[in-house]
Amino acid sequence: MDNQQREQILKNAKQFFRDEIVQNHINGACKRASRLPEYNVNPFLFKYLANFLTGNDTPESIARALVLPRILGSSITTSFGMKIQNLISSLFQGLGSTTQGIDIEFIDAIDGRKKYCQLKAGPNTINHDDVTTIVNHFNGVRNLARTNNLNVGINDMIVGVVYGEPAELSSHYNRVGENYPVFIGQDFWYRLTGKDDFYFELIDAIGEVALEVDGSEVVETTIQKLAKEIAEKYQ
């Protein structure tokens, strides 16, 4: 990969984050977080959490205790995970796979072999049932390859985890790893791009987009809207 290609990929990453993550966060997640029916409110805990956070249990404090974990945690993490394949597609045109159960195909920069890859967001983003699904998909691809006399080995079927460290991989990923390789974070991006520091360049590039965003006004508006609903229902 030459410098021009590298710069274009980083530019694409920043634009993707602006368009797909930031806009969805503001116009989607924050709007949903301003509506009380979006929450499964625990009547035994919501006043406690409000007091724990702010020292009082006014409707605004309750709203703040509900909104902040939602828009700064679960919603953005879920959104990112759902858009992983779109992210890769936007960065690396032509890598998308037509093979069932496979997200992308690429030539591994380390061993030079074609990889059939399922993409996952982070080190804790699969569950017990996903393990069987992943292994079955990979087994199916290998069986089809044998039928068509294609040289596809066990190590050519991989799970690519976009961010994280090997030590952070959940037990579910480790179960997949008993049958097929799981590459995470720096190692995954190195194999994909041929640059051993590309993972950190990508993190820095997306971090630059964060400096463009000030969501404080949106957060406060979300909290005030939810506080009004809480006051109407509980006060």
Image (spheres, grey):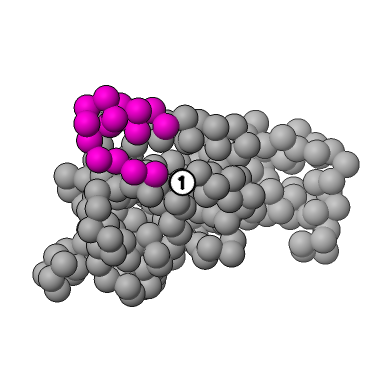
**Residue depicted at x 80% and y 54%:** 49
Q: Nearer the viewer, residue 154 or 70?
A: 154
Q: Which residue is mark 1?
A: 180
Q: Position of residue 230 (x, y in %)?
A: 72, 40
Q: Position of residue 1 (x, y in %)?
A: 16, 67
**Residue depicted at x 38% and y 28%:** 140
Q: Position of residue 101 (x, y in %)?
A: 37, 32
Left or right, 124 with reference to 119: right
- Kind of residue indicated by mark 1: Tyr
Q: Is residue 77 among what the camera can see?
A: no
Count of labels in the image: 1
Stretch of the chain drawn in magenta: 139-154
Magenta region includes residue 142: yes
Q: Nearer the viewer, residue 76 or 9?
A: 9
Q: Is residue 111 among what the camera can see?
A: yes
Magenta region includes residue 42: no
Q: Nearer the viewer, residue 111 or 20?
A: 111
**SS at mark 1 in the image:** loop
Looking at the image, residue 49 lies above or below residue 153: below
**Residue depicted at x 84% and y 38%:** 43
Mark 1 closeness class: few <14, some 14–19, many ≥20 residues within 10 Å: many
